[in-house]
Image: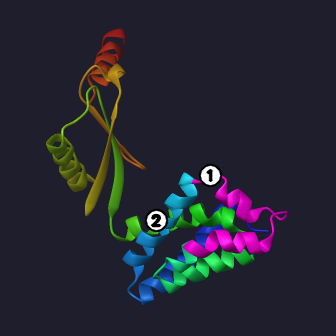
């Protein structure tokens, strides 16, 4: 039996390849994210759709609007397959893996900018541009989080890179130098 991550990776990879062949990756991603939002907004939906005691006809009536509103045939098919296999609880993982593949192929990096105060749009754009050049990305999507313990400066974090320009770290580094 496949674990959830392996299952999600296989299905997202297959869907990505099919959509790529049909030049529908962006449309597919957009629809997948919209449907995922429905699941995120209704946390019990995936649980209900995988509950074996819940009647099949009611499951179909719950998922039918999502299928009917989808313009991408392969996304419709994915929903039907997952419902039929009683795997709707895997849908959000599949979408996350699909988005990860999309971002990787398009060199899109998500990063957090930790700062003492909220950054202006101009500051976020400058940081994104610098970070984009440093990590070789085509696009950086920056999320600003406030952390007043930093004292000053900024820390940029993505999945595999951290640039720490915080005053707190500089003070700690000076302390280490003075104590050694």
**Residue closest to the eye, 111 or 39:** 39
| Residue under numbered circle 1 | 43
Q: Magenta stretch: dominant SS?
A: helix
Q: Check the image and name the residue furthest to the right.
A: 53
Is residue 44 inside the magenta stretch? yes
Q: Which span is picked out in magenta?
A: 42-65
Q: Where is residue 11, by image quadrant? A: bottom right
Q: Earlier in the sequence, mark 2 or mark 1?
A: 2
Give the color scheme: rainbow, by chain, secondary structure or one colour.
rainbow
Crowding at mark 1 (Cα within 10 Å: few <14, some 14-19, many 20+): few
Q: Is residue 180 left or right of residue 66?
A: left
Q: Secondary structure at mark 2?
A: helix
- Residue 10 position in % (x across, y down): 61, 74
- Residue 171 position in % (x across, y down): 29, 17
Q: Is residue 163 visible?
A: no
Q: Which mark is residue 34?
A: 2
Vertical comparison of 46 with 173: above or below: below
Q: Secondary structure at mark 1?
A: loop
- Residue 174 position in % (x across, y down): 29, 16
Tell me the quadrant of the picture where the N terminus can be found.
bottom right
Total marks in image:
2
Is residue 10 inside the magenta stretch? no
Residue found at x 31% / y 11%: 178
Q: Which mark is residue 82?
A: none
Tell me the quadrant of the picture where the C terminus can be found.
top left
Q: Marks 2 and 1, Cα distance to the nearest angstrom?
A: 15 Å
Residue found at x 18% / y 48%: 125
Residue found at x 53% / y 66%: 95
Residue found at x 52% / y 62%: 36
Q: Is residue 82 left or right of residue 136?
A: right
- Residue 138 position in % (x across, y down): 25, 64
Q: Is residue 45 visible?
A: yes
């Amino acid at each position: 039996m496949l674990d959830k991550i392996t299952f999600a990776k296989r299905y997202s990879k297959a869907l990505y390849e099919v959509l790529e062949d049909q030049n529908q990756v962006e449309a597919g991603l957009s629809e997948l994210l919209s449907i995922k939002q429905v699941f995120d907004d209704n946390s019990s939906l995936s649980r209900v759709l995988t509950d074996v005691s819940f009647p099949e006809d009611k499951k179909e009536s719950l998922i039918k609007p999502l299928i009917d509103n989808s313009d991408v045939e392969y996304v419709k098919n994915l929903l039907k397959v997952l419902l039929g296999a009683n795997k709707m609880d895997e849908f959000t993982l599949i979408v996350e893996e699909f988005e990860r593949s999309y971002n990787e192929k398009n060199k899109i990096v998500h990063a957090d900018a930790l700062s003492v105060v909220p950054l202006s749009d101009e500051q976020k754009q400058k940081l994104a541009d610098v970070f984009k050049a440093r990590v070789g990305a085509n696009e950086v999507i920056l999320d600003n989080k406030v952390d007043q313990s930093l004292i000053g400066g900024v820390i940029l974090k993505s999945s595999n890179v951290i640039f720490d320009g915080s005053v707190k770290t500089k003070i700690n580094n000076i302390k280490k130098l003075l104590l050694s």
